[in-house]
Image (spheres, grey):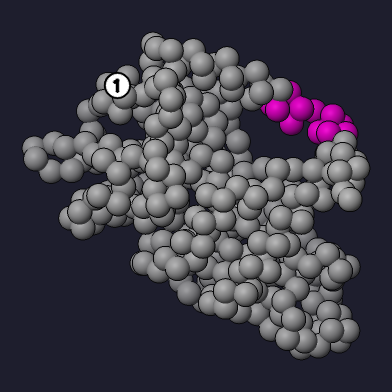
Amino acid sequence: MRPEELGEGERERWRELRAAADAPRNPFMEPEFSIAVARVRPRARVAVLYEGGQPAGFLPYERGALGRGRAIGLGVSDRQGAVLAPGAALETGELLRACSVSSLAFDNLEAGQGLFVPYAAEEHATYVIDVEKGYETYESALRTRSPKFLRTTLAKERRLGRRSGPVRFVFDERDPAALRTLMEWKSAQYRRTGRRDRFAQEWIARLVGRLAETRTGQCTGTLSVLYAGGRPVAAHFGLRSASVLACWFPAYAPEFATYSPGLVLHLRMAEAAAAEGIGMLDMGRGPAAYKDSLKTGELAVYEGAATRPGVGAALHRLSREPVRRAHGFVRARPRLAALAARTLKGAARLRRP
């Protein structure tokens, strides 16, 4: 069925199954995210598994042409997979057949997804900040592990205040203008670095708008903004549950880059999250210098596609595998990856008017 067709009883059962899982309560795995995606992606579906007349599992996905399926929100969702009751007896091929798909692509599959991990082609690290014991404990660990980084970042925050006016942080900003500013910054960053502008895709922009208005116990759109002298200098939009803040779209005003406002923003987000009782910030997959500086650990996520015999599976292999392997080849070679990044930036400069 379509995700928005789920009854409240089914949604509550979904939440119960997530609460009973060993995995962190990532908001991307909650029913509210799937329902929001369905509002902007007409091919979104959720398979509901029943056992003894009661819902025993849920698989949100998108169904494409010729039996090609994909995890719901593929490309923007930072955690994917099925939500199943412990011990649910199910075969992957049986599930795909019931969903009328020959393949199911994923790029941020949650660890512990026994139905799909065997089909993974690559394992990636997603970087996390643990504030379960409070922000002071996290800052103390940073001070021990990276004293220069913490000292320098805090000094830049003070200097920003002296040069631009009082620094103020809002963890849950509700001003729509601030969200528009963040999206403009992020679009400019994508173009500046030669990457595809996600917000140029209407469905992604609409999805973020819907999630900004979503406020439930386990999936709340959260816009955090760092101000200096009353002006926004860095912002982040993500999703939070009661225990996890999923970091999603961070950006800052380039003219303030010398003050590292993005790093300051993440420290303040960690502090505010801990005060809210949130134990983890998940910064997502993909290496970045700022993640290495801030992280306390890593979790595994997987990329690949579960398949069963069919045209859709063959098309998936032909269309996706060469690209995935090429990306993996580059990522595994730091010098080549650095060259690729410089080339993308150079191409972006040439495209500017």
Vertical order, 266 against 96 (above or below): below
332 in magenta: yes
Query: Residue 176: x percent and y percent?
Result: 57, 74
- Identify which residue, 158 or 340, lies in the foreground: 340
Image quadrant occupied by the N terminus: top left
Report the magenta stretch's main SS. helix
What residue did someone put label 1 on?
Answer: 97
Image side of residue 269 versus residue 192, left or right: left
Which span of residues is magenta-colored? 327-340
- Identify which residue, 88 or 195, lies in the foreground: 195
| Residue sticking out furthest to the front | 353
Q: Secondary structure at mark 1?
A: helix
- Identify which residue, 325 or 151, lies in the foreground: 325
283 in magenta: no
Residue name at image x 32 percent, y 19 percent: 93
Query: Residue 292: x percent and y percent?
Result: 72, 51
Is there any visible trace of residue 218 in the rendered image? yes
Query: What residue type is disc 1 on?
Result: Arg
Query: Residue 220: x percent and y percent?
Result: 44, 65
Quarter-of-image position of residue 250: bottom right
Residue name at image x 16 percent, y 37 percent: 50
Residue name at image x 8 percent, y 37 percent: 52
Residue name at image x 65 percent, y 50 percent: 200
Image side of residue 252 versus residue 105, left or right: right
